[in-house]
Image: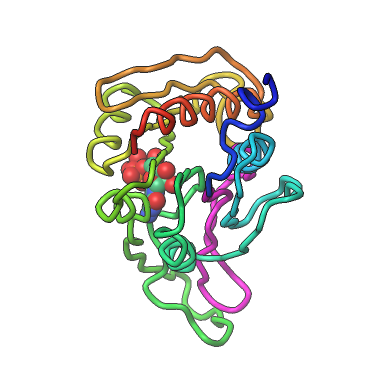
Amino acid sequence: RRFFSEQGQLSGKKVLVTAGGTVERIDPVRFLTNDSSGKMGYAIAETARDMGAEVTLIAGKATAPVPRGVKVVSIESAHDMMKAVLERLADADVVIKAAAVADYRPAEQARQKIKKKSEEMTLTLVKNPDILQTIGSMKTTQFVVGFAAETERIDEYAMDKLQRKNCDLLVANDVTQEGAGFGTDTNVVRIYDKNGLVQALPVMTKQGVARELLNLVAERIGRGEG
Ligand code: CTP
Ligand code: CA
């Protein structure tokens, strides 16, 4: 009974998780990326698996070990991630967007290594598509969870992202806090829904955060939300 009420809370559910940082190519030997370790998203994938879900992980650049028993699709750029997610969206019950997607990419990807020439060089960047916002605008029955990394005005920015991107839940972390953010094993998050703050969690391991978040997701999809 306990097994069904806890471990099996997501059994039969298809959960799509994005994790890690995207890699935006400048030329064949250079790229732009960020400090994402993939740990938060990987912990979510692992925990969803333990709760009985069928998990697909769309993974960018990450240092965390790949969890076993989940299907991993490796991608580089935001464009690749968008494509990989959209291909699987119709089939998903839950989509969790923990990836650190680059906001901009080089306007051009040089096919050959760029040679050094003048004393100054300018790299022009263009905006990437917003994957979460695209999912939010297309979603039918999917339960969508977004993330937000903030350094100030966390409640205000988090609620703005949740509304703009049409998320069912949004997990915000204040990356200036001790024990939160990129590369750490712990996180400090605040979880919101469309009515406002749902949970402010103390510093806990990323596995602990994953468990709390997925409990909320399971409870809400059990009530037919999404
Ligand atoms: N996200 C996305 N596609 C992008 C940028 C962000 O899907 N091109 C997603 C992230 O995966 C995350 C959420 O949007 O789930 C919020 O990311 P964040 O960087 O905090 O927000 P932005 O909307 O990019 O705003 P800003 O960086 O200016 O705060
Ligand atoms: Ca961003």
Q: Quadrant of ligand 1?
A: top left
Q: Is residue 108 left or right of residue 23?
A: left
Measured as percent of width and height from the top left, residue 45 is found at: 62, 43
Total label count? 0
Q: Quadrant of the N terminus?
A: top right
The residue at the point 25 percent across, 21 percent down is 195
Q: Nearer the viewer, residue 12 or 136?
A: 12
Range of magenta residues? 15-40
Q: Position of residue 132 (x, y in %)?
A: 36, 50
- Residue 52 as seen in the image, left or right of residue 170: right
Q: Residue at x 43, y 16 (%)?
A: 199
Q: Residue at x 47, y 25 (%)?
A: 216
Q: Residue 212 falls in which quadrant of the image?
A: top right
Q: Nearer the viewer, residue 86 or 22?
A: 86
Furthest residue in direction bottom, as rendered: 112
Residue in the image at 58% along x and 45% along y = 36
| Image position, residue 116 (x, y; %) | 55, 79
Q: Is residue 101 magenta?
A: no
Q: Quadrant of the C terminus?
A: top left
Relative height, residue 92 to residue 182 (above, below):
below
Residue 209, horizontal then vertical, whole percent: 58, 25
- 144 or 8: nearer the eye? 8
Residue 111, relative to residue 185: is it above or below? Answer: below
Q: Quadrant of residue 152?
A: top left
